Amino acid sequence: MKIGVLRERSPGERRVAIIPETAKRLLAKKIEVIVESGAGDRACFSDADYTAAGATIAATTDDLYATADAIVRIQKPEPADVDKLRPGQAHVSLLYPLVNGPLVKALADRKATAISLDMIPRTTLAQSMDVLSSQANIAGYYGVLAAAARLPRFFPMLMTAAGTITPARVLVMGAGVAGLQAIGTAKRLGAVVEATDVRPETKEQVESLGGKFLVVEGVEVKAGQGGYAAEQSEEYKKKQAELISDRISKADVVITTALIPGRRAPTLVTEAQVASMRPGSVIVDLAAEQGGNVQGCVPGEETVKNGVTIVGMVDVPSHLAIHASQLLSKNIEKLLLHLTADGAWKNDPKDEIGNGCVITRDGAVVHAKVKETVG
């Protein structure tokens, strides 16, 4: 089998799907690696690094498509990219198929085997393949650094000859992978950290990192599936807003991380709550790419409202492209080795991981939930 690694086209995307170290290990498993020239440049991996690892460099995109049995990339393909796929050729990337119906149909029409990295089930066996978790970890860390860089005050408490500096107060909304990393990072920087999440079972994790968990009392909480939060009732949202409004008004930094798979990100912070914050406060919205958790957030931009800076972060892991690529590449390696044997694709109907992330095959949409959504 030959896999082709594309150079990412998105302006803010600095990562690469396969790094040289991974290419070397894949070669040992009978999977040849062909890399488009310059694919790793923005992540600090040169063509020479790939050649030294045993990979082949393709001079053009067309050469890559013509030679590879599978195309591996990070971002979803554009229509022109889909048109280059041959029948039976595989395409591996973040597809977000539940909200990209036309893309799914186009991939099925090309009779491509579409594998969506964001649809890997969150099970124990699939942990090493979980792209979303590995990249969310980076986003949570970087989000705190971005807030600290913009906040016009220290994070930690300082006792100086000129007086005592009180610690910054940080509120993290959402205690998933990104949220937990944000809590831990803010705590290590010396802030007083509070956190909220619709899943009460995250309380222990929040407290283990030194954060205080805010609990919504007296309302039924809907349980999520597969490690994700569920959409909550209007009553819950109202009581949650009441609980955190006071905490938001006292926070120096708010970091929002809440996402629902296949849906727009839920609104957690209203314009009124933003207005209640002190001038100089900072909000970092890590859900900006999916609509944002903060009213008034503009994806990819930094805006100031009533003296409060709102950062709509996109392509967050790309800010730490070397380690982001390293983790992502390891995830993809584990997935490819799980889905193949002796350099050929396996087709195990009982494989939970394959059933979860293979979206189209042989001209049909084979993922049950995507098929129901796309039609």
Image: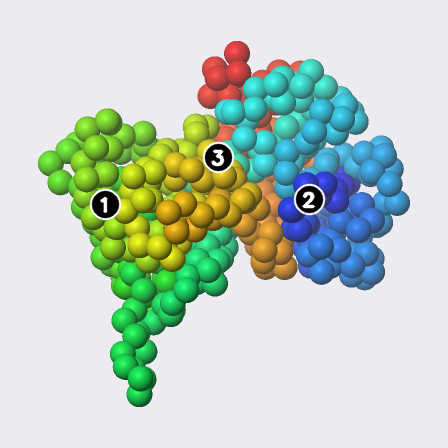
Tag 3: residue type? Gln
Between disc 3 and disc 2, whose residue precedes? 2
Badge 1 crowding class, 10 Å Cα cut-off, few under 14, some 14 to 19, many 20 or more, is many
Q: Is residue 175 visible?
A: no
* Farthest residue, direction front: 306
Q: Position of residue 11 (x, y in %)?
A: 68, 44
Q: Which mark is residue 290?
A: 3
Distance from label 2 to label 1 (Cα)?
36 Å
* Farthest residue, direction top: 375
Between disc 2 and disc 1, whose residue precedes? 2
Tag 1: residue type? Ile
Is disc 3 placed on a helix, strand or loop?
helix
Tag 2: residue type? Pro
Is disc 1 placed on a helix, strand or loop?
helix
Q: Nearer the viewer, residue 279 or 221?
A: 279
Which residue was labeled with disc 2? Answer: 11
Q: Nearer the viewer, residue 294 or 42?
A: 294
Q: Is residue 253 above or below residue 113?
A: below
